[in-house]
């Protein structure tokens, strides 16, 4: 795509954004609403439209090469990300659920569920690629040193075997030897039997040559006919789009060309960015050299005029503001010299009117309180959209686009390099601020000289009143820095050596495969709470984890999520999501799981030291993810005897303090994973984790997608002999981990070589799956029951009961009205 295409796309996106902002403003002005369905549709519509704008803005920021345009897009992009998170928070509060289904709105907007996918901005990694590479090299170097030292120590140790263990090893090896000999012997027997069978057919045939030829022709014609029919059937299925073409999975030449041009545009971006950074320095010096003296003279003239006008009106020269108060900038900030003089003359009269104003203000406050109470009563009857922290950011970016870029003629800039005029405008302000500081110093001295010469004022001190002692508030206790004299690099290295800072696996969030729940809205309309789909879970990870960790501005203003819990049966991909979270944002991964911290930093002081080190490094090298695997063990109801030595509840008491210490400016997220949440104390568990995401086993559509992907990943070939639909139906209850293991078990090197002669069948994958235990309905019900006891689950159950009672009352009213109408007719 060309520069003009992306510029047109940018204009179209801002038109959509302008229309959406007008809708938001009208919604804020409108009266409070009471119908929950209407409220949800409004929020969901805004959410979907913002997601569409977010997707196009992310593409524009990645591909536009103009450095100044990219800064405007980045500003808008962060505002849109924050607004999406705010709308999501409002939808959760309204529906008391983390998962939402808006199929009817998607149909009205002519969109598919795939259009709701939250894109992950590529600049999260791209902008700090060099830092991540350096950090990864240090991590690999330290890990290699620790692994070599541990392997040497293990090599020196010689394990002493008991007599029973030695006999068992000998027995195993002897039985294996005998098994190999027996297999060799049986192979020779089978080969001999095959030779004998073939020798019988070598006997000369008694058939006539003509009959033999006819039989051979019959077999050959049948074979070729079946082959042609099979080929024609496959072509027909492709033609009617019931089957994909043979090279459907492979990228087309057009797609390859698009990828190539995208990479080329990234190179051009870097070149233009370097030129822009150089221009910022050179053009600033140019503005200083050319316009510096003029700016200085105009500032001096303005300040002198202010001196003279103040002298004429008040009879004395004014006091010059200090540098801390802004100097001369505070005098002329959005005010003319005449306005400043009027305010200066009116200061004496203000003191006399203060008492009168106090009395009036008290009366006004009383009236306001009454009005506020009345307004609150009105607002309680309805719902109104909450104030946004990000709408001003989006509006500012929209105004910048309209004022500077919308009607700008760029025919003279086909290569999309920086615009020097805009840089000069920015740098002119910076130069003016720098010169103003110098001018202020000169004018302060000049004012002193004027006062000495005209007013004969030798700086006599004014009698000031007694300074009131400031009330001393309660001093907050500062946290002790146990590692005050240590560098971050040394702490980083120690945490790696202790195994508390680990290397995340290179997994993308898109690798967490699944399908959408296409019956979510239908089930909710029939008062059945559907299980979330895997792609709904993936969307929540992007919203609550990746977007806030990737952007500092979004994390500071968006609804703060300090901790996140991923609950679900084993094998559903909880650990994979944690690693994907780190990969997509370039975050450090700290492992504070009970099995990993056992025996490390013992005692209370050791525990404080460990927590202090982990969170100090996490804040200094943010973004960071603190992972607690088997999080239920930290909040055990009762610790099992086998695990008492591990001390799994070490972090329980300090967990609330850890959460309090995480602030909006700290891009640190605590992520817990659990497969047995019912073993933990519910209250403390839910207090520790703000957001709880329940990950279910895959449904039919997700299993179909997973089977296809796992088979192709391991070198398998999909043919008509492999009935994926039946395989997905039969494997109900099995998780992603089970399916992946089965695919790896079947698709060995030997089996892959046989694929062209012996295609895969569905029954082959049943044998390895039969050896594993699926997720039974009892376990799934246990997760549902546990989730219903969480704060959000309780709120949803309460709202459902209230809705049922309201519906019952409405039916009773209708019945009474019908009875009255019947009596009147009689």
Image (spheres, rainbow, N blue to C red):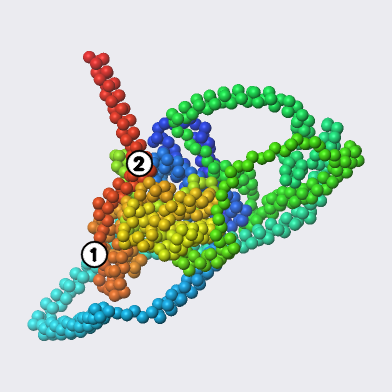
Q: Is residue 747 left or right of residue 603?
A: left
Q: Are marks 2 and 1 in contact (CB under 8 Å)?
A: no
Q: Nearer the viewer, residue 551 or 779?
A: 779
Please state the total of marks drawn on the protein image.
Answer: 2
Mark 2 = which residue?
A: 794
Q: Position of residue 642 (x, y in %)?
A: 31, 62
Q: Nearer the viewer, residue 684 or 88?
A: 684
- Which element is circle 1 on? loop
Q: Is residue 506 left or right of residue 530?
A: right
Could you classify mark 1 by the number of other residues whose Cα lies within 10 Å: few (under 14), some (14-19), or many (20 or more)?
A: few
Q: Position of residue 32 (x, y in %)?
A: 46, 31
Q: Nearer the viewer, residue 144 or 7?
A: 144
Quadrant position of residue 771: bottom left
Q: Position of residue 436 (x, y in %)?
A: 77, 48
Please indicate, yes or no, whether residue 235 appears anywhere in the rendered image.
no
Q: Which mark is residue 563?
A: none
- Which element is circle 2 on? helix
- The mark nearer the N terminus, 2 or 1, is 1
Please indicate, yes or no, whether residue 289 appears anywhere in the rendered image.
yes
Q: Quarter holding the C terminus? A: top left
Could you classify mark 2 by the number of other residues whose Cα lies within 10 Å: few (under 14), some (14-19), or many (20 or more)?
A: some
Q: Which mark is residue 771?
A: 1
Task: Compute the Cα span from label 2 to label 1.
Answer: 38 Å
Residue beneath the point at 43% across and 58% down: 627
């Amino acid at each position: 795509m060309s520069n003009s295409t992306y510029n047109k796309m940018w204009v179209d996106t801002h038109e959509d954004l302008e229309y959406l902002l007008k809708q938001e403003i009208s919604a804020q002005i409108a009266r409070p609403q009471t119908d929950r369905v209407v409220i949800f549709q409004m929020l969901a519509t805004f959410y979907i439209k913002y997601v569409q704008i977010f997707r196009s803005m992310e593409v524009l920021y990645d591909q536009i090469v103009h450095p100044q345009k990219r800064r405007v897009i980045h500003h808008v992009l962060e505002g849109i990300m924050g607004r999406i998170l705010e709308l999501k928070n409002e939808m959760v509060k309204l529906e008391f659920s983390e998962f939402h289904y808006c199929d009817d709105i998607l149909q009205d907007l002519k969109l598919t569920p795939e259009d709701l996918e939250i894109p992950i901005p590529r600049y999260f990694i791209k902008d700090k690629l060099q830092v991540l590479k350096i950090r990864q090299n240090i991590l690999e170097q330290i890990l290699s040193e620790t692994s070599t030292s541990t392997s040497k120590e293990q090599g020196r140790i010689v394990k002493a075997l008991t007599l029973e263990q030695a006999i068992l090893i000998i027995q195993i090896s002897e039985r294996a030897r005998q098994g190999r000999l027996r297999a060799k012997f049986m192979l020779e027997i089978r080969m001999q039997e095959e030779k004998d069978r073939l020798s019988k057919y070598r006997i000369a045939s008694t058939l006539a040559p003509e009959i033999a030829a006819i039989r051979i022709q019959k077999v050959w014609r049948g074979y070729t006919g079946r082959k042609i029919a099979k080929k024609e059937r496959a072509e027909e299925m492709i033609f009617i789009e019931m089957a994909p073409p043979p090279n459907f999975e492979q990228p087309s030449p057009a797609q390859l060309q698009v990828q190539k041009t995208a990479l080329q545009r990234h190179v051009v971006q870097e070149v233009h960015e370097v030129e822009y950074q150089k221009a910022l320095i050179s053009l600033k010096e140019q503005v200083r050299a050319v316009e510096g003296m003029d700016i200085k003279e105009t500032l001096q003239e303005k300040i002198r005029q202010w001196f003279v006008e103040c002298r004429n009106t008040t009879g004395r020269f004014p006091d010059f503001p200090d540098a801390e108060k802004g100097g001369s900038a505070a005098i002329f900030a959005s005010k003319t010299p005449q306005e400043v003089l009027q305010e200066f003359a009116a200061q004496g009269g203000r003191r006399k009117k203060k008492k009168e104003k106090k009395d009036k203000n008290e009366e006004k406050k009383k009236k306001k309180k009454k009005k506020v109470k009345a307004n609150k009563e009105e607002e309680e009857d309805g719902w109104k959209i909450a104030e946004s922290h990000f709408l001003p950011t989006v509006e500012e970016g929209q105004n910048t686009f309209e004022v500077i870029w919308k009607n700008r003629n760029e025919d003279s800039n086909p290569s999309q390099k920086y615009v020097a005029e805009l840089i000069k405008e920015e740098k002119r302000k910076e130069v003016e601020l720098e010169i103003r500081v110098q001018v202020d110093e000169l004018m302060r001295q000049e004012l002193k000289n004027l006062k000495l010469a005209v007013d004969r004022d030798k700086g006599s001190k004014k009698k000031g009143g007694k300074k009131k002692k400031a009330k001393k508030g309660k001093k907050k206790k500062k946290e002790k820095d146990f590692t005050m004299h240590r560098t971050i690099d040394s702490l980083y290295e120690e945490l790696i050596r202790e195994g508390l800072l680990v290397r995340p696996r290179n997994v993308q969030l898109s690798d967490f495969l699944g399908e959408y729940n296409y019956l979510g809205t239908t089930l909710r309309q029939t008062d059945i709470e559907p299980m979330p789909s895997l792609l709904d879970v993936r969307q929540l990870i992007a919203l609550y984890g990746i977007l806030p960790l990737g952007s500092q501005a979004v994390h500071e203003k968006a609804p703060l999520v300090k901790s996140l819990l991923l609950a679900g049966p084993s094998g559903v991909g909880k650990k994979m999501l944690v690693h994907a979270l780190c990969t997509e944002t370039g975050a450090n991964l700290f492992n504070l799981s009970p099995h990993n911290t056992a025996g490390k930093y013992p005692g209370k002081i050791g525990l404080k030291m460990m927590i202090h080190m982990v969170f100090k490094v996490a804040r200094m090298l943010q973004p960071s993810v603190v992972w607690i695997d088997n999080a239920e063990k930290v909040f055990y109801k009762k610790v099992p005897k086998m695990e008492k030595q591990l001390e799994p509840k070490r972090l329980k008491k300090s967990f609330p303090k850890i959460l309090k210490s995480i602030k909006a400016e700290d891009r640190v997220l605590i992520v817990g994973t659990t497969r047995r949440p019912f073993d933990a104390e519910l209250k403390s568990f839910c207090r520790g984790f703000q957001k709880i995401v329940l990950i279910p086993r895959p449904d039919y559509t997700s299993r179909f997608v997973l089977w296809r992907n796992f088979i192709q990943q391991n070198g398998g070939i999909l043919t008509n002999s492999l009935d994926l639909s039946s395989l997905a139906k039969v494997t109900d209850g099995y998780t992603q981990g089970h399916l992946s293991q089965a695919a790896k078990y079947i698709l060995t090197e030997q089996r892959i070589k046989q694929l062209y002669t012996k295609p895969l069948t569905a029954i082959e994958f049943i044998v390895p799956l039969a050896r594993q235990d699926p997720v039974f309905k009892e376990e799934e019900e246990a997760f549902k029951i546990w989730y219903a006891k969480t704060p959000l689950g309780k709120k949803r159950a309460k709202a459902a009961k209230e809705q049922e009672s309201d519906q019952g009352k409405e039916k009773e009213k209708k019945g009474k009205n019908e009875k009255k109408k019947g009596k009147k007719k009689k």
